[in-house]
Image (cartoon, rainbow, N blue to C red):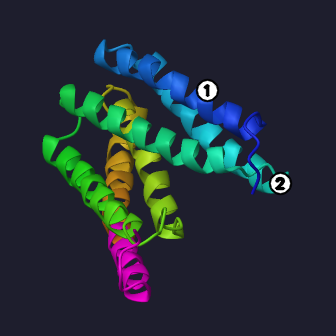
């Protein structure tokens, strides 16, 4: 793990962050092609930054912070945009945001015991993968083509699996947090 800032994976993560306001504007103003392209580029860059970092030893502390932050920001803006346009129901937004709020509390709790974070689980990565594929498919499903008719149920399958896995990963993080607290019976000062 390095402290390097200027690496290709970090640049990709920053570019993903730059795409967030572009995506939000596009989805809210119903420029769906631009929204889809931005969202797809985000997904590709998300895959590439992690792959490049691991393959070429460019993992950095900044990358560990930027990557999940960009993922969460895309998920949040996509949820908001799709719900605003009535493509997804607001209860789905509440379910996913509720999990994030719960985990923010868990991270605050373990931080009191000297733990700065919890390792990412494969289940959490799988949940994010499902959600990042669900949203473009649900947006594509709004069309009238044959492809749209296929995209909609597949998008909802990814959304359901992603939501369930998101909560399973949340429970796994809670169990992990309890183990951290049990190992340190007195909060760090």
Question: Foreground residue, 111 or 68?
Answer: 111
Task: Determine the residue positioned at 37% across, 57% down.
Answer: 162
Report the quarter where the N terminus lies: bottom right
- In the rendered image, which quarter is residue 142 located in? top left
Q: Is the magenta stretch mostly helix, strand or loop?
A: helix
SS of the residue under disc 2: loop
* Of callouts 2 and 1, the N-terminal one: 1
Residue 87 visible at all: yes
- Give the numbered dot on residue 136: none
Question: Foreground residue, 40 or 176?
Answer: 176
In the figure, is residue 113 to the left or right of 2? Answer: left
Residue 85: image location, x then y, percent: 21, 25
**Is-magenta flag for residue 44?**
no
Task: Determine the residue positioned at 42% across, 19% down.
Answer: 21
SS of the residue under disc 1: helix
Report the quarter where the C terminus lies: bottom left
**Is-magenta flag for residue 188?**
yes
The reply to whether callout 2 and callout 1 are in contact (CB within 8 Å) is: no
Q: Is 8 above or below relative to 117?
A: above
- Give the numbered dot on residue 15: 1
For the residues marked 2 and 1, what is the alpha-carbon distance in whole angstroms? Answer: 20 Å
Q: Mark 2 points at which residue?
A: 57
Residue 68: image location, x then y, percent: 51, 48
Task: Determine the residue positioned at 79% across, 48% down.
Answer: 58
Q: Bounds of the magenta span?
A: 170-189
Q: Is 57 above or below relative to 147?
A: below
Task: Determine the residue positioned at 37% across, 46% down.
Answer: 155
Residue 37 visible at all: no
Q: Is 82 above or below relative to 99?
A: above
Residue 164: image location, x then y, percent: 31, 65
Query: Farthest residue toward the right?
Result: 56
């Amino acid at each position: 793990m390095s402290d390097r800032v200027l690496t290709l994976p970090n640049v990709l993560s920053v570019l993903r962050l730059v795409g967030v306001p572009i995506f939000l504007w596009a989805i809210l103003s119903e420029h769906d092609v631009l929204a889809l392209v931005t969202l797809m580029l985000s997904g590709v860059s998300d895959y590439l930054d992690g792959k490049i970092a691991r393959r070429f030893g460019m993992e950095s502390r900044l990358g560990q912070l930027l990557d999940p932050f960009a993922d969460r920001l895309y998920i949040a803006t996509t949820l908001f945009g799709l719900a605003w346009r009535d493509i997804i129901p607001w209860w789905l937004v509440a379910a996913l945001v509720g999990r994030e709020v719960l985990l923010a509390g868990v991270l605050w709790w373990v931080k009191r015991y000297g733990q700065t974070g919890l390792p990412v689980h494969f289940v959490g990565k799988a949940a994010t993968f499902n959600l990042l594929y669900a949203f473009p498919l649900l947006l594509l499903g709004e069309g009238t083509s044959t492809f749209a008719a296929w995209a909609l149920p597949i998008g909802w399958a990814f959304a359901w699996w992603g939501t369930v896995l998101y909560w399973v990963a949340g429970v796994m993080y809670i169990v992990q947090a309890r183990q951290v607290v049990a190992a340190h019976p007195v909060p760090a000062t």
